[in-house]
Amino acid sequence: MKRTLFVLACLLLASLACLGQGTVVPPTPTPSPSRHASLPAGAVKSTPADDAWPPIAGPGWSPPAPLEGPVNTPGGEDSPFIAPDGETFYFFFTPDVNIPAEKQLLDGVTGIWMAGRSGDGWGEPQRVALAPPGELHLDGCPFVLGSQMIFCTIRESSGGMALYEAVWQNDTWTDWHAWEEIDQDYQVGEMHITADGQELYFASKRPGGLGGFDLWVSPRTGDTWGEPVNLGATVNTSGDENRPFVSADGAELWFDAASRAGKPGPAVYRALRQPDGSWGQAEEVISQFAGEPNLSADGQTMYFVHHYFTPDMSRMLEADIYVTQRLAP
């Protein structure tokens, strides 16, 4: 399985991006291109009924199902993030999971999208503008806390992969610029800041880990973040652990990694906070092409990405946002 749809396209954009200092200006209000119009001709929506490798949830969670409403399409929806207040849903979209990366950069739709709450579900998503009109760029892995968004990006003005931030003002994300709170030597990958703002969790291949991508934590120290600490062998292995998420109450650490139960593709794991503040032994909760976990603030709904594959697992068909509910004890 690809690490993320976003990272694949970024690798190509890195070779195209030119060095230089871009000028940050507000976006020109224009209608978002239609996601559905951008889909490949003849695209057919995959469903649980024809899924050769459906996701499997462990005890305590309901059978996973696609997110209801207009978010999922026959294309690729990835990197789900529900805002802490539960009123806005963010995700990454690309119309064809098998399209060459260079064509993702120019299609006008690949990037971060957001949907507002509509009753018990979600309204029609809109593209999030995070760069000046005309600048070659690609944005992904959104994280939102209060009026701040931190996101992965690669663009002409940065010259390579970077973490940027934006500010929510006048009902739009604006004032996007490089996120300068973190020491670049920390080599921060996809990240999550706890609800109290005191801990930064991130994936990294930085020296001192157990192998591959490990999960690390940095404590808040004034206006910056302290020296990262590896989460240790109860969480990390010699393989890759990625995309951390900490529940709003700080009691649960979620992430994805290769299945340790013999299932195909990545799986979603959970570790529980121990009395001394460390994390207990991680357990596999959702298996079979499941990743990028994100939990609602009340702790009851888990959002994650599920990738549909052909029966022989030779080709990915699409990616959807799935949900599972925590069951009563």
Image (cartoon, rainbow, N blue to C red):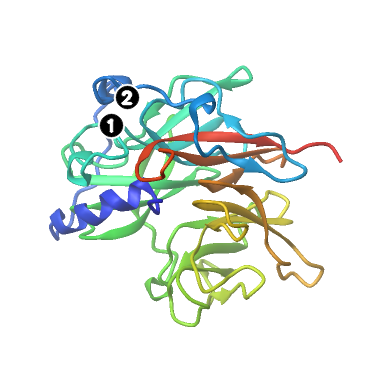
**Front in this rendered view, residue 53 or 218:** 53
Would residue 118 be found to the left or right of residue 165 on screen? right
The residue pinned by badge 2 equals 35
Q: How far apart are marks 2 and 1 (CA)?
A: 6 Å
Q: In which quarter of the image is residue 33?
A: top left
What amino acid does circle 1 point to?
A: Val
What amino acid does circle 2 point to?
A: Arg
Q: Residue 275, position in %: x, y?
A: 82, 68
Q: Pointers 2 and 1 in contact (CB under 8 A)?
A: yes
CA neighbours of label 2 inside 10 A, class few (<14), some (14 to 19), many (20+): many
The residue pinned by badge 1 equals 109
Would residue 271 be found to the left or right of residue 205 on screen? right
Q: Can residue 30 be seen in this view?
A: no
Quadrant that contains the C terminus: top right
Would residue 221 be found to the left or right of residue 5 on screen? right
Q: Is residue 228 visible?
A: yes
Q: Residue furthest right?
A: 329
